[in-house]
Image: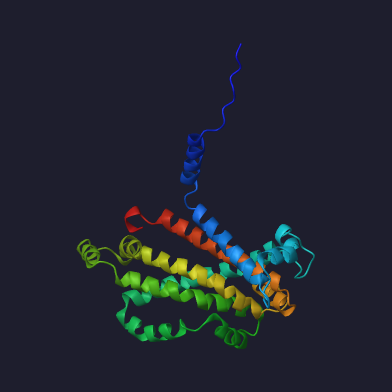
Amino acid sequence: MTLAQKRPASPKFNNGFTSRLQKQFPDLIPPAIAIIIFLIIWQLFALTPGATLPGPIQVVQDTWVLIFWPFYDRGGIDKGLFWQILASLKRVAISYTLAAIVGIGLGILIGVNKTMSKALDPIFQLLRTVPPLAWVPISLAALRQNEPAALFVIFITAIWPILINTAVGVTQIPQDYNNVAKVLQLSRKEYFTNILIPAALPYIFTGLRIAIGLAWLAIIAAEIVMSGIVGIGFFIWDAYQNNNVSEVILALIYIGVVGLVLDKLMGWLQNKILPAEQK
């Protein structure tokens, strides 16, 4: 009886496995390679004489507790990054929701009323260019309390893209739609729900998607004004004050990841709600 010899894996099998892998993860391989190259370059720069910022290896060594135990809670502000980010997300959720309600409402108002548009557009164009940090002293002077001041900074940063994009969407409604509404003698409510909102929805979502990123960016400015609170913005400021640069870098990475996730979630919601012809 002859025993069949085990054949080594053929090149065709390897090529087939690699091909399937590339088909399954076509969007993951390029960014993974880019991240690896970035980390290598970062580490090399950190090793050069006179470098002041730690490299990725040093960051992991200095912050391994924060990385592997994000849920710890020792009371006060001594909490893991999960709780820091969660507290910041709650503030962003409150201010972003208010910005969406007010921004969409005002956007529709100035979009359908040319007089209001001409009157308010210069003010909106002026205020929208003010950076988040510039609103900090004004919000503190007006509101006198840290928490409302921080919420206002996030709100005032996020509202402008929602408002402006909504107004543009309303003004860009095809004239044929308006003519059909007049022929059918639609009521204001019917015109609003059947013509205006569906036609302006792509513009509204564009504004909402931009605004969620700006709201998350403003959390740093908002939470710097709040001393002794839980939040990723104050965590960064406190780490900087204590010269913990590695913790600052780690927090920045977390902020970037959360911002990316928020943007992807808004994009997913947009694809689910918008009709196929409007995507």
Q: Residue at x 68, y 62 (%)?
A: 82
- Residue 58 lies in what quarter of the image? bottom right
Percent position (x, y) of residue 117?
Answer: 34, 81
Q: State whether residue 250 appears in this view.
A: yes
Residue that lies at the very extreme toward the right in this rendered image? 74
Q: Please tell me which residue lies in front, 25 or 155.
A: 25
Q: State whether residue 89 appears in this view.
A: no
Quadrant containing the N terminus in the rendered view: top right
Judge whether 195 appears above or below 21 on screen. below
Quadrant containing the C terminus in the rendered view: bottom left
Residue 125 appears left or right of 54:
left
Percent position (x, y) of residue 245?
Answer: 70, 74
Residue 38 appears left or right of 58:
left
Judge whether 48 appears above or below 144 on screen. above
| Colour scheme employed for the rendering of this structure | rainbow
Q: Please tell me which residue lies in front, 141 or 271.
A: 271
Percent position (x, y) of residue 160?
Answer: 45, 76
Q: Residue at x 42, y 86 (%)?
A: 123
Residue that lies at the very extreme toward the top in this rendered image? 1
Percent position (x, y) of residue 186?
Answer: 27, 63
Q: How many marks?
A: 0
Q: Residue at x 46, y 66 (%)?
A: 209
Q: Residue at x 43, y 53 (%)?
A: 272
Q: Please tell me which residue lies in front, 16 or 157.
A: 16
- Residue 148 lies in what quarter of the image? bottom right
